């Protein structure tokens, strides 16, 4: 086993660099290039629950009687076949773990995909669940129960590990992660980076901001990785967003992550950034006398530092206090 090897959701990876679900991983040939560049695992581009609904609604269903039923079922089957082909072809070309991804917001219309995804050879399934809590009658318990219900139903249908990628819009993230663990999740990804709206002043229309992360975003990830990995045992953490260098990767591991998901760094700098991160990790481990990642993973998480309040917001007041100026 390689010195930089790690274990995530029960999967053995040659290193902790995992490529996030994105346009980088939508073709088997691209995935082979990422493996050759040094990636430890790949999360395939997501199969979207809403994509099926949008595709069928965009067709002209008035041309033939009862066409909506047939068009919807055809598109559904076609989307699934393409995704199964992507899993199978990537598995044929690559030797690293291949993780499928479903972007969903309910348990309707896609649960029958799950077993077929396992049969196609996916090593794990990442559920990218997102619900925007914008209702004035918002009930957090009901909101969270939707997530738990999805995980439990998926867990009951497959034997491969289930991973949940979550957003940051929860009042108590450690409690929520523990609930996901109890429902059967083997790992969580902290966090999903959603598109953010902007306003075009000239056109007076909504637009989208840059979808790529920046290096400063890793600090927020470090806080919650350190807290979750220290307070919720028995579930692995993938740090995601803001990992652009080997330094930031090592920091997430020290905070307790098992892997770091990268995407924007490759878009900005190319696949060569993967080997740069691995080389930094290897050199840093040698300099500090670590033989394996397990020797230092979580060394600086919430439970393993002398003053865990450093991970909490109150530390900000200490930082700006007169004695620290």
Image (spheres, helix red, strand yellow):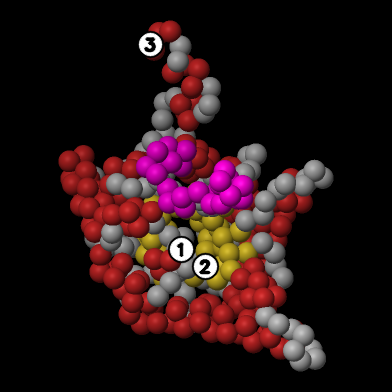
Mark 1 to mark 2: distance in Å? 6 Å
On whether residue 212 falls in the magenta region, the answer is yes
Quick one: SS at disc 2? loop
Q: Residues within 10 Å of mark 1 (few under 14, many from 20)?
A: many
Disc nearer the start of the sequence (1/2): 1
Up the image or down, 101 lies above or below 187; here it is below
On whether residue 105 falls in the magenta region, the answer is no
The residue lying furthest to the top in this view is: 322
Could you say where residue 52 lies in the image, as x and y percent from the top left?
64, 74
Disc 1: which residue: 21
The residue located at (51%, 78%) in the rendering is 83
Mark seen at residue 46: 2
Left of 36 or right of it: where is 115?
Answer: right
Up the image or down, 100 lies above or below 272; here it is below
Left of 253 or right of it: where is 100?
Answer: right
Up the image or down, 23 lies above or below 72; here it is above
Boundaries of the magenta span: 196-222
The residue lying furthest to the right in this view is: 137
269 vs 92, nearest the viewer: 269
The residue located at (33%, 80%) in the rendering is 93
Could you say where residue 130 lies in the image, as x and y percent from the top left?
62, 56
Mark seen at residue 130: none
Could you say where residue 46 lies in the image, as x and y percent from the top left?
52, 67
Mark 2 to mark 3: distance in Å? 47 Å
Could you say where residue 217 lies in the image, as x and y percent from the top left?
43, 41
The answer to whether the residues at label 1 and label 2 have Cβ atoms under 8 Å apart is: yes
Left of 39 or right of it: where is 288?
Answer: left
Of the 4 image quadrants, the one containing the N terminus is bottom left
Q: Residues within 10 Å of mark 2 (few under 14, many from 20)?
A: many
Disc 3: which residue: 325
The residue located at (22%, 53%) in the rendering is 276
Quick one: SS at disc 1? loop
């Amino acid at each position: 086993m390689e010195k930089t090897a790690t274990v995530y959701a029960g999967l053995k990876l040659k290193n902790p660099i995992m490529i996030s679900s994105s346009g980088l991983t939508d073709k088997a040939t691209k995935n082979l290039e990422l493996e050759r560049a040094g990636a430890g695992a790949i999360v395939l581009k997501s199969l979207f629950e809403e994509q099926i609904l949008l595709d069928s609604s965009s067709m002209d269903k008035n041309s033939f009687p009862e066409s909506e039923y047939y068009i919807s079922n055809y598109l559904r089957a076609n989307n699934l076949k393409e995704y199964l082909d992507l899993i199978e072809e990537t598995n044929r070309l690559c030797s690293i773990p291949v993780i499928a991804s479903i972007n969903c917001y309910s348990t309707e219309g896609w649960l029958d995909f799950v077993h077929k995804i396992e049969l196609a050879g996916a090593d794990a399934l990442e559920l990218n669940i997102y619900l925007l809590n914008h209702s004035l009658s918002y009930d957090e318990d009901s909101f969270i129960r939707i997530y738990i219900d999805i995980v439990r139903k998926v867990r009951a249908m497959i034997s491969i590990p289930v991973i949940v990628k979550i957003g940051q819009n929860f009042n108590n993230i450690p409690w929520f992660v523990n609930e996901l663990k109890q429902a059967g999740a083997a790992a969580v990804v902290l966090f999903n980076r959603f598109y953010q709206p902007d306003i075009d002043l000239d056109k007076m229309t909504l637009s989208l901001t840059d979808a790529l992360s920046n290096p400063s975003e890793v600090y927020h990830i470090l806080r919650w990785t350190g807290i979750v990995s220290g307070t919720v045992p028995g579930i692995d953490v993938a740090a995601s967003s803001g990992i652009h260098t080997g330094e930031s990767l090592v920091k997430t591991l020290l905070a307790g992550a098992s892997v770091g998901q990268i995407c924007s760094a490759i878009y900005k700098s190319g696949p060569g950034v993967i080997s740069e991160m691995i080389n930094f990790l290897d050199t840093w481990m040698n300099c500090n006398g670590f033989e394996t990642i397990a020797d230092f993973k979580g060394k600086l998480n919430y439970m393993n530092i002398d003053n865990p309040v450093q991970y909490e917001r109150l530390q900000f007041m200490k930082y700006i206090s007169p004695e620290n100026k």
